[in-house]
Amino acid sequence: MRAIGVGFLFSTIDGSGAFPAISGALKPGLPGAELEQTTMDLDSLYANLTLETNAKLALIVLDGLGDIATREQSFLTPLEAARTPNLDALSKESAQGRMIPVAPGITPGSGPGHLGLFGYDPLEFEVGRGVIEALGLGLELKGGDVAARANFCTLDAKGIVTDRRAGRIDTPVCEELCALLASKIKKIGDTQVIIKAGKGHRFVVVFRGKGLEGPLTDSDPHREGLAIPASKPVDAKSAGAKKAAKLIGEFYKLALPLLAKKQPANGFLMRGIAHQPEIPTFEERYKLKPACIAVYPMYKGLAQLVGMTKIEGPQTIQEQFEAYRANYDKYNFFFVHYKYTDMHGEDGNFEAKKKAIEEFDAALPILLEKRPDVIAITGDHSTPCAVRGHSWHPQPVLLNAALSGSDKLDRFTETGANIGSLGVFQAKYLIRLMQANARMFDKFGA
């Protein structure tokens, strides 16, 4: 059946449920339909409708939370298998749904995943992981800096990567190796080299000099059994990126001999090689004063990139929720990040991921003692144990507020989220739904 010259008003495949009152025409391409915006910019609309608030909003991210039910695990996910009495109680008075981090079928990195949760379209705001990690470690980047996120790895005698994480060496070992590299490689030509250890096997390298630019391709094969590839400019015409790629090649020539006898960390991989982009701050965008409570540098860096204040010190989820309570009166938006669900998903360890969820649940009452007006609990992406890495599967989300409504679901699970009232929507709209539930939007139109 053909419809000729008919305008449509509907929710797009992103499932935002916002019905932004934009007329357009159906375009083929993505599954379902994409609405061609013809009359207004949504960000401008939201900005014009936004009101100041005294409400408290909390975005709680269990990294890589989403999973898939497989025969090997009796068709249960870790979230479904976990004992979560506190999440269960919260779910009874909450709405649930599923979120697409970028677009259907696209597997996101942690950077795009979190930027989407912060309400920044990850296709519009591309940020290199090196920049994020460097900021998270407290490095102040300058114009002309190119930053790379790195991790130690294990190489065999032929230079083939046999373990991309060097057996997950402890942080003190990483610090010792980084100190060695930093003491021996301070400059390459006229370019300063800054090396700083992160958590576990991770570290950051910053190249500071004139005429440098990113982004560059990763010097990481992204799986075992391959050699370390050379880093190359994404834009082959960029002179600054060509210079940066040459520097990285020189850095490898100097660094690998220093690590040759440092098993299991006798090599390293670099990715997210880029310079810092311009991005509007969270407070400007949403009229909210935000704070970040995270343990790992990358997530602190993501928060700092959008202007969140980092609350330093907490090392466990219990301490993170205690820090939330201690700072309750200072901020009205809190981003709390919990890493271990993702870590165990990448290891393919179902039981450990389930246990990490249970440990989170046990700490949840600390947060609820000073309950925010709006709570969103979700992941930045899915990390199924069967995949042993990030995936394209929509992540579950729970939204709790006085006006969120209840889906009358007894548990927070992927299966329950499939039938929740939030439906399936793009992650970049979660912050807008949180604002709506905080009564932060004026009415649109008469």
Image: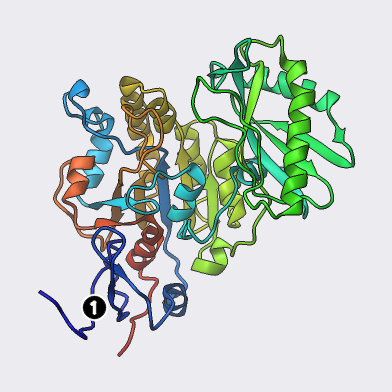
User: In the rendered view, would you say 441 is above or below 245?
Assistant: below
The answer to whether 150 is drawn above or below residue 393 in the figure is above
The quarter of the displayed image where residue 246 is located: top right
Residue at (58% x, 18% y) in the render: 160
Horizontally, residue 267 falls left or right of residue 122, namely right
Q: Can residue 417 be seen in this view?
A: yes
Of residue 179 and residue 432, the one placed in the foreground of this image is 179
Quick check: 387 left or right of 179? left
Single out the residue that lies furthest toward the right.
190
Compared with residue 304, is residue 24 higher up or lower down, i.e. above or below? Answer: below
Quadrant housing the C terminus = bottom left
Q: What element carries label 1?
A: loop
Report the residue that reaches farthest toward the front: 237
Could you say which quadrant of the image residue 169 lies in? top right
Do we see residue 179 in this rendering?
no
Residue located farthest toward the bottom when viewing the structure as drawn: 446
The image position of residue 408, as x and y in percent, is 14, 50
| Residue, far left | 1
The one nearer the camera, 268 or 60, is 268
Question: Few, some or many C-alpha atoms within 10 Å of disc 1 (few <14, some 14-19, many ≥20)?
Answer: few
Pinpoint residue 294: horizontal percent, then vertical percent: 53, 40
Q: Quadrant of the N terminus?
A: bottom left
Q: Quadrant of residue 350?
A: top left
Residue shown at 23% from the left, 73% from the top? 10
Q: Which residue type does callout 1 highlight?
A: Leu
Q: Picture coordinates of residue 336 (x, y %)?
A: 47, 44
- The total number of labels drawn is 1
Q: Name the residue under label 1.
A: 9
Residue at x 43% of width, y 53% of height: 117
Q: Where is residue 303 in the image (x, y as percent from the top left)?
A: 56, 50
